[in-house]
Amino acid sequence: MRPSRRTTAILVAILVVCLAAAVFSITLADRARPSATLEETLYIPSPSVLKRMSLGYTGLLADIYWTRAVQYFGGKHVLASHEYKLLAPLLDITTQLDPHLTVAYQFGAIFLTQPPPNGAGDPDAAIKLVKFGIQENPDNWHLYYNLGFIYYLEKKDYGAAAQAFEQGSRVPNAHPFLKLLAARMAERGGDLETARMLWTMTYDDSKDKDIKANAISHLRALQVDETVPRLEQLIRQYFERTGHDPGNWAELVRAGYLPGIPLDPAGHPYKLAPEGNVWVAVPDALPFITQGLPPGVKASEMPKL
């Protein structure tokens, strides 16, 4: 064996032994101190230093750090801790060492997002982690899915959620539901034009009859959500001019405010309700609407597809 190869082999062997010893020592420490927080255990906290020391075995080190992150999270969770200070650094080191270890992004984001004592309660750190994962794995649609739901559930940022889902929907072999979720988030966030575009694209691109029917239902809902406020504005204008609300749609037609009695997308006349409100006649015929709902009927809080 050449001297250079012998030296490399010896160094690799030493590295493996040291890593194994480190893991073994920490395991013993964990068993000896089951109630300890172990916040002092970060191994070596610098990814760049670890990469230089790894002699190319960064994947092995990443697995060790991911295992440590899971152990750390599990220990904190068992103790019902409200602080997970080392969780984000451990996940950062793990993914810096192996940017393609996608399980660390998916489950790490869950660990970071869940509110204490079930997790770190840090959705911003989760977003940062998943965005790095997307940067390093742009063809993994699951990461866009994870990011969209963090924005939706934790940040209530429907525009950002819609953008994440929409970007993910363009990844090869992405699940078709991403496009549906993108449209729903845009609709939920009040961006009706974007929602209409996305639902129209969903209808045009899909061959599934159920998905097409669902897209049509959402497009009808968007039409209602635009029409009802416009009708209520006309009623206010009529009141300002005459001093009283119209008794029926015919009055608005005669006054030139409308070309005819307004119908909803299901073909039913809108109801002219008290105090200038406009209701849909049969809400069950128009799922997903947020405007024109009679008293006692509420829009769903969940992102129905």
Image: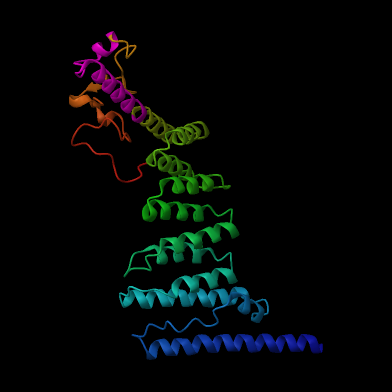
Q: Position of residue 21 (x, y in %)?
A: 54, 89
Residue at x 37%, y 41% (from the top left corner): 188
In the image, 38 versus 101, the foreground residue is 38
Looking at the rendered image, the quarter that the C terminus falls into is top left
- Give the side of residue 210 with respect to residue 139, left or right: left
Residue 253 location, quadrant: top left
Q: Where is residue 144 in the image (x, y as percent from the top left)?
A: 50, 52
Looking at the rendered image, the quarter that the N terminus falls into is bottom right
- Give the side of residue 84 with respect to residue 61, left or right: left
In the image, 1 versus 102, the foreground residue is 102
Q: Position of residue 216 (x, y in %)?
A: 41, 30
Residue at x 23%, y 20% (from the top left corner): 239
Residue 230 falls inside the magenta stretch:
yes
Residue 91 falls inside the magenta stretch:
no
Q: Position of residue 277 (x, y in %)?
A: 23, 27
Residue 188 to residue 260: above or below? below
Residue 285 to residue 249: above or below? below
Residue 5 location, quadrant: bottom right
User: Which residue extends farthest top?
Assistant: 254
In the image, 217 versus 253, the foreground residue is 253
Residue 2 location, quadrant: bottom right
Q: Give the range drawn in magenta.
A: 225-254
- Give the side of residue 216 with respect to residue 23, left or right: left
Q: Is the magenta stretch mostly helix, strand or loop?
A: helix
Residue 2 to residue 284: above or below? below
Residue at x 31%, y 30% (from the top left corner): 286
